[in-house]
Amino acid sequence: MRAFEVVDADGERVRVTAGSDPELFWALRGGGGDFALITSIELNLFETPHLYGGQIVWPADRTGEVFDAFRSITAGAPRELPVWINRTAPPPPSVAEPYLLHLLGLRLPHLAEAVRGRQAALVARLGGAVSGRKPYTFLAPGGSAAQAFPADTLARLRRIKRERDPGHVFRANFPVPGRTS
């Protein structure tokens, strides 16, 4: 991100950059929709000699082996390497940066025990690499921003919210100041 054009809580149009307003710039880069109405985003582009993309699919019976290989390869990979792994089979879990585990599943009572067992096995296999947090964009009804951010990050987002929008003009689906009615 290079810059954001926003409308702030006072209704003012503002250009926000890392130099002009470091705290708001930081919050806008992933803190949810609680800080301003973003009307435009300016991105940096980087020249690259090679670009690779695509999907590799493995059979379900190789899940453990594939997860192990993924963890081994990404452990020393540069942060600039955007890779992720998905295991798509009901229920479809996904592992995202760096090893955030979010499990989705059908809420069918007759499958609940089996699903919980399968989820527990996946979590155990990933060991200490799993944080227990969810990506903010994966939060579901009833969730809170506290499930997505570490405590120090959430505290910083809450401080920025109090400073920039004390009247709660902006309310994200999962507001950083906690539930408001």
Image (cartoon, helix red, strand yellow):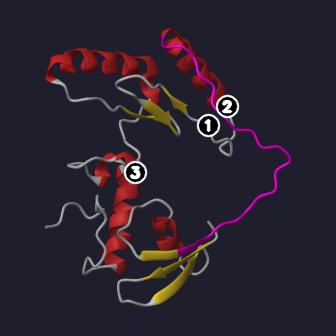
Q: Amino acid at mark 2?
A: Gly
Query: Helix, strand or loop at disc 2?
Result: loop
Residue 76 has which mark?
2
Q: Is residue 79 above or below residue 176?
A: above
- Verify whether residue 59 appears in magenta: yes
Residue at 70% from the left image edge and 65% from the top image edge? 44
Residue 137 has which mark?
3
Labelled pair 3, 1 in contact (Cβ < 8 Å): no
Q: Quadrant of residue 88?
A: top left
Gap in Å between the C-alphas at discs 3 and 1? Answer: 18 Å
Q: Amino acid at mark 1?
A: Val
Q: Picture coordinates of residue 25 (x, y %)?
A: 52, 71
Mark 1 Cα within 10 Å, few/some/many (few <14, many 20+)?
A: some
Can residue 98 be seen in the rendering of this structure?
yes
Residue at 61% from the left image edge and 77% from the top image edge? 19
Labels 1, 2: front one: 1
Q: Quadrant of residue 81?
A: top right
Q: Which residues are magenta?
A: 40-60
Query: Helix, strand or loop at disc 3?
Result: helix
Mark 2 Cα within 10 Å, few/some/many (few <14, many 20+)?
A: few
The residue most toward the right is 49
Q: For this rendering, which residue is in front, 61 or 65? A: 61
Labelled pair 2, 3 in contact (Cβ < 8 Å): no
Residue assigned mark 1:
83
Name the N-terminal-most of marks 2 and 3: 2
Name the N-terminal-most of marks 1 and 2: 2
Gap in Å between the C-alphas at discs 2 and 3? Answer: 26 Å
Q: Amino acid at mark 3?
A: Thr
Classify residue 137 as left or right of residue 173.
Answer: right
Q: Is residue 141 above or below residue 99?
A: below
